[in-house]
Image (cartoon, rainbow, N blue to C red):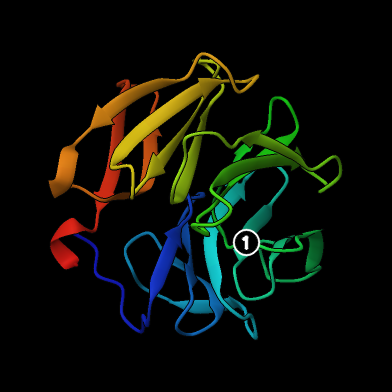
Amino acid sequence: MVRLVGLACVIGLGDATPGKIYWADSGLKEIRRANVDGSAVETVVAGLSQPQGIAIDASSEKVYWTDAGTLKVQRCSMDGSDVEDLVILDGGSPAGIDLDLGAGKMYWADEDITMHKVQRANIDGTSVQTFVVSNLKVVSDVAVARGHGRVYWTDSLNQHVESANMQGSDRYKHIECGFQCSPVALVLDEATNNLIWADTYQAC
């Protein structure tokens, strides 16, 4: 087990890049990183409002994140330079984010209970679209599985993990866990075909 110190309120954890892990800390209002053994914790981007989800494009050496305070999807270089505003939303609460690099797309969840949707855009922030909107309540995270041709998401109020094809149709509920479950963060391990999620029910 690796222990990270100096954390305030970690919301999103990015995939590990060679030697590093990245995360969004909404308490410190920062994007941070450390060595994979938990050492050398450092700030990548400071002065954010409410960073939530985070995703890594290691091939282009870019870090993507959502900020629920400013309603933005942003990115920067892995050293924290060249911060860009990719999408500025007019409402909602952007949360988990994931990348479909093969198609040049990014997907993010909106966990505002009045918005209840999954959105996507080109990787540069253009062509924002609503991907899924019906029969959702509080969508916290998304995970793209290009190999399966599916996009997965958690819905903590509907208490299930669901997916759709890349066109937003052929929806399927993978996990329906009833009243004793509140799935939020989500990871798909394509190598083992396992869905892994965090459950905040016991913390409520």
List the single residue furthest toward the right.
126
Total marks drawn?
1
Q: Which residue is mark 1?
A: 92
- Displayed quadrant of residue 49: bottom right
**Where the C terminus falls, by quadrant?**
bottom left
Name the amino acid, label 1.
Gly
Q: Is 75 positioned to the left or the right of 96 in the image?
A: right
Residue found 17% across the figure and 66% down from its top: 203
Q: Secondary structure at mark 1?
A: loop
The residue sitting at 75% across, 60% down in the picture is 89
Give the left or right position of residue 13, taking residue 99 as reference.
Answer: left
Res 162 quadrant in image:
top left
Image coordinates of residue 100 in percent, x first then y, are 64, 32
Q: Position of residue 161 (x, y in %)?
A: 34, 34
Q: Is residue 14 above or below residue 50?
A: above
Question: Could you say where residue 139 lies in the image, as x and y percent from the top left?
Answer: 46, 48
Q: Is residue 7 above or below residue 79?
A: below
Q: Quadrant of residue 68?
A: bottom right
Residue lying at 13% horizontally and 48% vertically, measured from the top left: 180
Q: Residue 92: x and y, percent? A: 62, 61
| Left or right: residue 20 compared with residue 202 | right
Which sits in the foreground, 64 or 199?
Answer: 199
